[in-house]
Amino acid sequence: MSASHSKRLINSVQDCVDENLDGFVSINTGIRRVIGHRIMVREDYQDVIKEGKVSIVSGGGSGHEPQTTGSVGKGMLTACIMGSIFASPPSQEILLAIRLVAKHNPAGCLLIISNYTGDKLNFGVAMEKARQEGIRVGSVTVGEDCALVSQDKSAGRRGLVGVSVTFKLAGALSEEGRSLEEMIPLLNNIICNMGSMGLSLTACTIPGSGATFTVADDEMELGLGVHGEAGIKTLKLKTAKESVKIVIEHMTNPENRYHIKLSNRDRIACFINNLGGTTNMEMNIISGEILTYLKDTMGVVVERAYSGSFVTSQEMCGFIVTLLHVDDTLIGLLDARTDAPIWPHHLLSSVKKDDRRPINVELENVEVETRDIDAIVFKTPDDSYLMYDIINNICKSLISSEARLNLLDTEGGDGDCGSTLSKGAQVLLTMLGSKDNPGLPVHCPYLLSLSVANIAENYMGGSSGALYSLMLTSGANCVKDIISPTSWHQALHTAINTIKRYGGAELGDRTMLDPLYAASEVIKERMGKDSIVSVLKRAAEASELAARQTANMKARAGRASYVSADRLKEADPGAVAVALWMRAMSDTIEKYYS
């Protein structure tokens, strides 16, 4: 299909996500939007706390409606957080939602996380912070995609329709009064017995942008995700019957790494999902073919069948089929009553049934009290001036490289890596202020690290924002009590390990870790032997080489790991960005000491 911009019935690209939410709560008046935030809650969320039931929280990017917002209601989610289009919600928003529905809930809070890097990182940040505040919080990560065939390491199974199914089952368990400790292993076992696979006739477009990939008029894409990434294989266009056969055969093929096992007389529930642009006629035909194939060819017993939009990818024309092994207990959970619109019906307020205007919620008593922090500061103003120059030049480097990084990101991502980093850098530059009157604590490395981490988290957004926030937050403690070359290197080392722990990437996975690790090794080897200028210059050169070498690596983490290797010819944009700021830092320090 054409990659030209699609027509949209919106008012503006900038406001479409918020206006989407406002329109949604105008229809579903039993759901409230938190003022000033993209957080949606059940109007009776306080009853969940009073009744001693576990609060259920999740979230995701806009463009997948009704998966997140439509899943709020009794018997499903207590609250959800919406990100920008196809982007994970910011960790600070997630934390606010957790505080709102769980700060005073002794039963605790369950986070349901879709197995995408950005979601795992941002929910991970929020969960760690919530636990530090004494909130009982646990999580399950949903990844049930059966598309991947390679045995190589990747970012793992994507969360698709199974995320919505998990919402329903978790909500039903909460309504039964199950504890957080009971729910987590039950849900993890359910997720392991579920599988999904998608097929599309078209790509999708993001408001204001073109198509994310191309599907010819006589072709279809097999095994795609819901974030605009291409599938694992392009096929010639088939009939509905042939397409269903291809999808289910792939899902159940034991030679594929992630397959779902089906045996004769197995009891299953089937969910047939409209990706957003498939007509009702097509969906009815596809549904009939799927149920016929499952019963007649596979010999399974379809105990429950559902058809509709559980998760969409804007206007993508296609479907996802999800299969879940069930028993009497799971059937009971699926049958349990829910008010959530996704199933689908409108949730009307018990207070104002005849009024379509939304009743919003103000955040009260959910902010953490600030406290004084005792941390070491630079001994001389010159050190503070140098730190100012380093931050200033790093920001300018990232801003000037926006177009280059975006172009690199079109291969394995959604083409916004440069814009994401530039956005954060512009905010940071504004907040930095002047050298004589800085707006950030450039005199204190610990406080500066935390300040920049918050800027990355709140203004940069996406996986990059979460990764840099984790890096800076974890590394900050290393320069809290002592400032030395050793402590700075320890901060970098700690940051690398934190990224590995939360992001799931390793050295050689074609990510930002590769140049970070290369620089760290040079510093470790040369520190104490060469001058600081020489060490950092070598570290910058090592990071640049490592970034270039990612062009020849196989992606095994992040969104690029879902893209065919033959489509990845250029260097990883996140790795290039690291090399850019390493070079900016090195050049600034060299100029200072020259």
Image: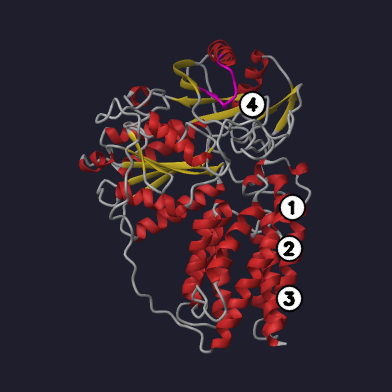
* Cα–Cα gap, marks 2 and 4: 36 Å
Residues under numbered marks 4 and 3 in contact, where contact means CB atoms less than 8 Å apart: no
Pointer 4 local density, CA inside 10 Å: few below 14, some 14–19, many at least 20 = many
The answer to whether residue 279 is magenta is yes
Disc 4 element: strand
Could one spot residue 498 in this view of the protein? no
Where's residue 418, x and y in %?
Answer: 67, 55
**3D distance between C-alphas at marks 4 and 3:** 48 Å
Amino acid type for the residue under numbered disc 2? Ala
| Residue type (three-letter) at the residue carrying disc 3 | Arg
Residues 355 and 40: in front is 355
Q: Earlier in the sequence, mark 4 or mark 3?
A: 4
Q: Earlier in the sequence, mark 2 or mark 3?
A: 3
Query: Left or right of 87: which side holds 577?
Result: right
Which is more toward the observer, 51 or 19?
Answer: 19
Residue neighbourhood size for the residue with mark 2, other residues' Cα within 10 Å, grouped as few (<14), some (14–19), many (≥20) = many
Q: Secondary structure at mark 3?
A: helix
Decide: is 246 above or below 401: above
Residue 292 position within the rendered picture, expressed as x and y whole percent measured from the top left: 55, 11
Q: Is residue 113 above or below residue 450?
A: above
Residue type of the residue flagged with mark 1: Met
Judging by the rendered image, the residue that carries numbered circle 4 is 199
Question: Which residue, given by chain and number where applicable, does mark 2 sit on?
Answer: 546
Determine which residue is flagged by label 3. Answer: 538
Alpha-carbon span between mark 1 and mark 4: 28 Å
Q: Inspect the magenta stretch and tell me whether residue 341 lies in it.
A: no
Q: Quadrant of residue 73?
A: top left
For label 3, the crowd category at 10 Å Cα-Cα, with few meaning under 14, some 14 to 19 and many 20 or more, is: some
- Residue 553 - label: 1
